[in-house]
Image: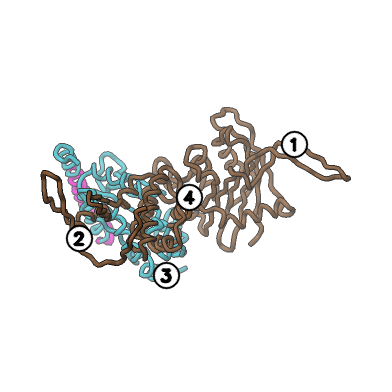
Chain colours: A cyan, B brown
Amino acid sequence: MNMEGLKSIYRARRERILVPLAKRLNDYLIEIVQDYPRIDRVTARAKDVDRFIAKAQKVENGSAKYSDPLVQIQDQIGARVVTFYLSDVEKLSKILEGYLAPIEFQKIVPDSPNEFGYEGKHYIMFFPDDIRGRVAQEDDVPDFFELQIKTLFQHAWGEADHDLAYKPQGGLTIDQKRRVAFTAAQAWGADRIFNELAQELVTR
Amino acid sequence: MTPPKILSYLVPPGKSNPNPEEVRGTEIPPTGKLATMLIDAFLKADKECDIPIRFVPAVDGQQQNEVRTRIIELIKSPTLQNGQVLAERLRNVTTGKSGLGLLFLMVGADGPTNKIVISRFPADQGILAEARRGTLEVEFVERIFMKSAATYKSAIYKGKSLDAGFWWGYSVDKQINAGLDQLRLYWIRDFLASDFKTTSKEGRKCLAVALKSASKAAPSIAAKQEIISAMVLTQGMAGKAVTIQRLMSRFRLSDEARSAVEGQVHNDTVLQNTFQLDLEEFKRHATYETVELDNGAILTAPAEEFDQTFLRELINEANERYRFSTTGSIVEQRIKSRR
């Protein structure tokens, strides 16, 4: 299938299935975490058409990474729960793992202790049947969605980094990369300090 | 659909045994009575297996499951050697109590959809009786493998994509209704490296919300009372593997009450999902608060709405006298015998 054909199929799927499904997922996640005291936001979104196509075109070891992108790309719906402190991430993970079943989970940290960059807790989760609605049996309904649980600083840094990384045509210069790493280090440090303060001052 | 390729293995118990017996396998020819019976089981597995299960990820969180990997290898190349790995895995989790079993691995396709059925027939003892030359010959048989036995187990996985699919399927385990101890879950958890597709909390939440919403939506007081009774009785099922469908049958809900519950779930799959019931989440979503007064009045409302439904005023502190008041339209009223 060519990329135009794929784009057209994904666009139709997105409007008919993914957008309403993301809305139900959003409500579902809010219901699960509503009693937790330090939730900044809960979001669930269907992947943009352009970002889906960009991912579908990825090359790995000289050949296309995805032979069947509509089936293989598992983050066609992405959800995020943003909380205040690092210790909240672990507590919320336990709560959400009680309701949702993963096929993958990982704590993303930079490869080297000398590096600062993207951090967060990521899952690939099964969609609960309860929110799949009346279209539960259709092939077009994805089996999985991506769930991220982040602190406010991880979220803020990730959003800005994602936005800036898409801007330049030729990639970032060394100085720009160092400045991005500096902001990541600041966010990492702020998370640590706030978490320590929370341990001292917050009881629940 | 082309006939499935059928591999069979005699699997002795070998759990915790450093020198387990060897697993022996053979390929079943595609014709004859045995093939006919097995192909029938292969075709009927879609209906027979009704417990949704999912593969669990690796301990380190990687999107990898050893049994899924072996199943996909077997679908790609259904050889005795590839099936042997699964048969040996079954042996290594089978206790002496579960005993000897005959494992069948049936690999086929239905159009573009790949399908594999994995079945374990338990060994039993029996008596063979044959009428020959006007007499009856009766013989003791030590190893009979019976599909009808209570310990028969099976699982089915289907999918178009071998790379991205095959993360979930369905199982049948006739022992599962009796409880959830290790023996009964050795098929799903130990052998298939899987778990129920619906988590315990998710299942309980769906059940509680469905019953509670149905208790409000039911068209008659009789149906409402049935559903509220079911909510009470459900608490006695703690620890059991249940489905909403089976609970409704167990509590013998009327068609009216059943229809009210079914109307509260988003799809039929939710009614059929098996999950382990414990009470914490159920109570969180499905509790009614009742206050009984010494004048004979009984006030009932959903627990989290009770204080909004009934205004409570302290009239006399010394005697602890309260006045409760509420406002609403009467939707049904009836007189009930005191008996």
The residue range painted magenta reads A167-189
Q: Quadrant of the N terminus of chain B?
A: bottom right
Mark 4 highlights which residue? B53
Q: CA distance from mark 2 to mark 4?
A: 47 Å
Whether discs 2 and 4 lie on one chain: the answer is: yes
Instruction: Please name the residue that numbered disc 1 is placed on.
Output: B140
In the picture of the structure, the residue carrying the numbered disc 2 is B326
Task: Please say whether residue A179 is one of the residues in the magenta stretch.
Answer: yes
How far apart, in angstroms, are the residues tagged by discs 1 and 4?
Answer: 39 Å
Q: Residue B207: x and y, percent?
A: 38, 54
Rendered residue at 43%/60% (across/down): B258
> Which residue is denoted by mark 3 in the rendering?
A9
Q: Callout 3: helix, strand or loop?
A: helix
Q: Amino acid at mark 4?
A: Ile
Q: Secondary structure at mark 1?
A: strand
Density class for disc 2 (Cα within 10 Å; few <14, some 14-19, many ≥20) is few
Looking at the rendered structure, the kind of residue marked 1 is Phe
Q: Are marks 2 and 3 in contact (CB under 8 Å)?
A: no
Which amino acid type is shown beneath numbered disc 2?
Thr
Quadrant housing residue A18:
bottom left
